[in-house]
Image: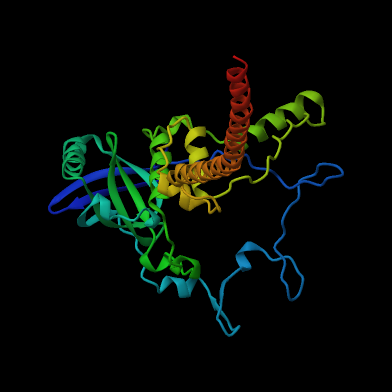
């Protein structure tokens, strides 16, 4: 059962809403005691003085502040009583601001506000006004005798008081590496956007759980049931090493692992991502045609040489045939004449 830790009233304008304050969160971490390893005895902390070594009672302890130069300034209860202590029980609305102007880094602890039975209507009125205008109320409130800055925001049907850090408590990220100019290629941005889309979804907090805390609870239960020892740990997955050739490849594989569809890589991106000595694909047919032309020229040259070699042979053959023909005519003529004479 939730227990109220503070009573007060929300004040905006002339309207007061009496409320009770409850812690909105709780810590479920498994806590351990410090014990003596040999016999399990609890270890008790004693307050001892670093100067005299004696144990000091709580009533003898004062508050001390050490300055930058090492000087110790002590403050007792009378000194603290002179400070302006915030002890009011009013949540004073200072300003209503757009929700998107609140830096989440400023948010600290969360508390639920429950209205008193007589203040249900003004409570609902404030809640719906914040919801309809999509605004949060910046307030000042005194908790544990200190005034703090806080927000009023809506969560379901409840108004949440969210304490805030003071602006000077937020550190600036002064990192030299953030000043480095980074050249992001369009293909990398497109692939990163695809990865974001593949892992997108509505946030449901109940689908997440603390695996480490559960593992500690399982280990404690195992040792309780088995009187000590520990279960055999699961084999760690084999380390395949870092085989990511570049950022674009890593993004593509991440999109595929998330079940998404990686965008098609443009030809320009493919040629620029890896530098090779090969020419673009469209030049290869030109080279093939060039080689074909050279081959044809060589074939023609060989044909001409062959034709040149054949020409003398044919000429010689024609001359031989002509000579034989002439010789045959000479031999044939006398024979013809002899046949005439004989007749």
Residue at figure coordinates x 77%, y 23% from the top left:
225
> Could you tell me if residue 177 is visible in this image?
yes
Quadrant where the N terminus is found in the figure: top left
Q: Position of residue 46 (x, y in %)?
A: 72, 59
Q: Position of residue 152 (x, y in %)?
A: 28, 48
Asked whether 43 or 99 is in front, the reply is 99
Residue sitting at the far top = 343
Q: Is the residue 114 above or below the residue 84 in the image?
A: above
Quadrant where the C terminus is found in the figure: top right
Q: Is the residue 59 above or below the residue 320 in the image?
A: below
Q: Position of residue 271 (x, y in %)?
A: 47, 49
Q: Quadrant of residue 295?
A: top right
Residue sitting at the far right = 38
Q: Quadrant of residue 196?
A: top left
Residue at figure coordinates x 74%, y 27% from the top left:
222
> Could you tell me if residue 91 is visible in this image?
no
Q: Is the residue 38 above or below the residue 86 in the image?
A: above
């Amino acid at each position: 059962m939730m227990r109220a830790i503070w009573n007060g009233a929300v004040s905006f304008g002339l309207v007061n809403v009496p409320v009770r304050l409850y812690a909105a969160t709780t810590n479920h971490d498994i806590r351990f005691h410090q014990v003596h390893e040999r016999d399990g005895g609890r270890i008790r902390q004693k307050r001892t003085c670093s100067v005299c070594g004696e144990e000091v009672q709580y009533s003898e302890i004062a508050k001390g502040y050490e300055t930058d130069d090492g000087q110790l300034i002590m403050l007792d209860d009378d000194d603290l009583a002179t400070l302006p202590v915030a002890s009011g029980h009013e949540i004073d609305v200072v300003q209503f601001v757009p929700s998107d102007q609140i830096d989440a880094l400023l948010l600290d602890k969360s508390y639920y506000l429950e209205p008193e039975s007589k203040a249900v209507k003004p409570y609902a009125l404030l809640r719906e006004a914040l919801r309809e205008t999509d605004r949060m109320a910046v307030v000042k409130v005194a908790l544990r005798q200190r005034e703090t800055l806080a927000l009023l925001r809506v969560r379901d049907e409840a108004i949440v008081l969210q304490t805030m850090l003071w602006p000077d408590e937020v550190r600036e990220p002064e990192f030299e590496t953030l000043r480095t100019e980074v050249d992001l290629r369009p293909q990398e941005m497109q692939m990163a956007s695809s990865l974001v889309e593949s892992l997108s979804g509505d946030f449901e907090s109940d689908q997440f759980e603390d695996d480490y805390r559960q593992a500690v609870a399982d280990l404690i239960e195992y040792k309780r049931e088995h009187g000590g020892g520990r279960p055999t740990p699961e084999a760690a997955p084999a380390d395949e090493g870092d085989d990511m050739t570049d950022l674009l490849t890593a993004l593509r594989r991440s999109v595929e692992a998330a079940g998404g569809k990686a965008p098609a890589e443009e030809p320009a991106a493919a040629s620029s991502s890896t530098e090779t000595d090969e020419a673009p694909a469209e030049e290869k047919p030109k080279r093939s045609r060039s080689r074909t032309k050279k081959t044809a020229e060589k074939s023609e040259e060989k044909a001409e040489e062959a034709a040149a070699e054949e020409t003398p042979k044919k000429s010689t053959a024609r001359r031989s045939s002509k000579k034989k023909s002439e010789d045959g005519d000479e031999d044939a003529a006398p024979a013809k004449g002899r046949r005439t004479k004989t007749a």
